[in-house]
Each structure stands twice: as C-alpha cells, then as structure tokens.
Image (tube, rainbow, N blue to C red):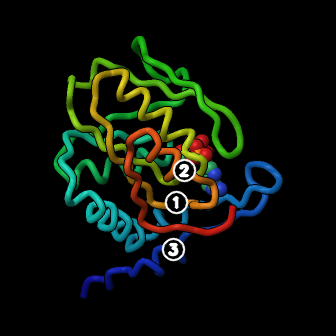
C-alpha cells in the first residue's frame, strides 16, 4: 500500500528549527529534514503544484541552493524547463547580477540572460521567504532579462519578516505551502 499523503501539519512537523544559525538570534527553519523524507518531499511537491494549478507557467526559476531542489521537481511536474538563479561566480558565461540583503547577510544572484525567451511567464520558486530580499533580487533579474514574473512560490513563509508584502509592492503574488510565526 502506498504511504498516506502527508497533511499540511505533517509537512510542517518535518521542518527542523535550529536556534542561532547562521548567527545568534536567528531561528533557522531547515527544510533538509523535510526533503530527506520520501513522503515529505512528495507532499511538498504536490502542495507546490496545487499552488501553481491556476497559473500559466512557461518556466520555473529556482534560487540556489535549496530552491533548485524543489524548483526542478516542480518544473518537471508542470512540464516546463528550469531556470537556475545562481549565487555569485558560478556561471561559465557572461551574467546579469543583482546584489541584495537577506535576513542574515548580503549576497549576489546571477542569471544567464540568454536562457530567457522574451515575454515568457516565469514562476519563481524558493524554499523559504523571510524578508523577501532574495526573491526580489531574483525577480529583478528575470524582469531585466525580459521575462514576466508575477508569481512566486515558497515551501515556507516567515510572515513576521514581511516578505509577502515586499513582493506584493513589486507586483508579485507570493504563495506558500506553510508559515511559521516568529523569527
Ligand atoms: O527572504 P530573505 O530574507 O531574502 O531570505 C530567504 C533566503 O534565505 C535562504 O537562503 P540562503 O541565502 O541561506 O541560501 P542557501 O539556499 O544557499 O542555503 C533561503 O533559501 C532563501 O533563499
Ligand atoms: N530563519 C530562516 N531560516 C531559514 N532560512 C532563512 N533565510 C532567511 N531567514 C531564514
């Protein structure tokens, strides 16, 4: 008999909370424990696909590193290609870059613009939304390269950090499988 489909609260229970990582005062919501569980990974991809069901999507763009895992699986499920948004210095070709701040630091994302077709609808995907700094930098890159980016999906939202509002102010509707209150 196949394993039972996990409920939303089953999926939430699979996310590990690690205090004081990567800096004192940060409660790190770690999806490693969800993705390493077979039913957890399948349940998360099912839930992301349900959140995308009413969207017209030409491609899924995932943010390095954990956004690659869920993003590639979702793209395969939706029958689209996958666009990697990479951390700095990884691409072998000239890249567009956007610097940003996140909950616990600063970083740079890069995109090879030649893999974007002008006007294609790209669904942004990451494992977690906190301040929205990372997702907004990703959306800026996709838009600079000529894509339409109006929706973003996340496995986890941390609503107290305001990411959904920040996305909405830039014309992006964010949706998440689960939310954790507090930081
Ligand atoms: O909404 P924000 O405040 O921008 O934070 C969210 C980002 O933080 C984490 O990534 P991290 O930079 O730790 O990278 P990783 O996936 O490579 O571990 C997470 O995977 C998101 O990409
Ligand atoms: N609290 C948190 N847990 C996991 N990833 C994060 N990215 C930004 N804030 C985070």
Looking at the rendered image, the disc whose residue lies closer to the viewer, 2 or 3, is 2
- As drawn, 179 above or below 52: below
Looking at the rendered image, the disc whose residue lies closer to the viewer, 3 or 1, is 1
Q: Please indicate whether residue 156 sits to the left or right of residue 149 in the image.
A: right
Which quadrant would the N terminus be assigned to in this image?
bottom left
- Residue lying at 52% horizontally and 24% vertically, measured from the top left: 98
Residue 12 image label? 3
Residue 111 position by quadrant: top left
- Residue lying at 45% horizontally and 60% vertically, measured from the top left: 155
Q: Earlier in the sequence, mark 2 or mark 1?
A: 1
Out of 70 and 157, give the one closest to the viewer: 157
Query: Mark 2: few, some, or many residues within 10 Å (few <14, many ≥20)?
Result: many
Q: How far apart are the alpha carbons under marks 2 and 3?
A: 19 Å
Q: Position of residue 169 (x, y in %)?
A: 47, 42
Q: Please indicate whether residue 103 sits to the left or right of residue 32 in the image.
A: right
Residue 45 position by quadrant: bottom left
Label 3 element class: helix
**Residue at mark 2:** 163
Q: Are marks 3 and 1 in contact (CB under 8 Å)?
A: no
Outermost residue, front side: 169
Query: Mark 3: few, some, or many residues within 10 Å (few <14, many ≥20)?
Result: many
Which quadrant would the C terminus be assigned to in this image?
bottom right
Q: Earlier in the sequence, mark 3 or mark 1?
A: 3
Q: Position of residue 159 (x, y in %)?
A: 57, 61
Looking at the rendered image, the disc whose residue lies closer to the viewer, 2 or 1, is 2
- Residue lying at 32% horizontally and 34% vertically, measured from the top left: 83
Q: Position of residue 158 (x, y in %)?
A: 58, 60
Q: Earlier in the sequence, mark 2 or mark 3?
A: 3
Q: Are marks 2 and 1 in contact (CB under 8 Å)?
A: yes
Q: Please indicate whether residue 77 sits to the left or right of residue 156 in the image.
A: left
Outermost residue, top side: 94
- As drawn, 93 above or below 83: above
């Amino acid at each position: 008999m196949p394993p039972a489909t996990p409920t939303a609260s089953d999926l939430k229970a699979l996310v590990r909370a690690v205090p004081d990582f990567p800096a004192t005062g940060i409660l790190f919501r770690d999806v490693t424990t969800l993705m390493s569980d077979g039913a957890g990974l399948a349940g998360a991809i099912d839930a992301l696909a349900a959140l995308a069901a009413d969207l017209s999507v030409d491609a899924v763009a995932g943010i390095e590193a954990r956004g690659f895992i869920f993003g590639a699986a979702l793209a395969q499920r939706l029958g689209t290609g996958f666009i990697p948004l990479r951390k700095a210095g990884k691409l072998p070709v000239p890249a567009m870059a956007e610097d940003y701040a996140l909950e616990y630091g600063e970083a740079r994302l890069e995109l090879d613009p030649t893999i974007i077709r002008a006007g294609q609808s790209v669904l942004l995907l990451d494992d977690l939304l906190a301040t929205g700094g990372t997702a907004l930098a990703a959306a800026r890159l996709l838009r600079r390269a000529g894509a339409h980016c109006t929706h973003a999906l996340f496995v986890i939202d941390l609503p107290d950090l305001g990411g959904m509002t920040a996305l909405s102010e830039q014309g992006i509707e964010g949706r998440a499988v689960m939310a954790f209150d507090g930081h």
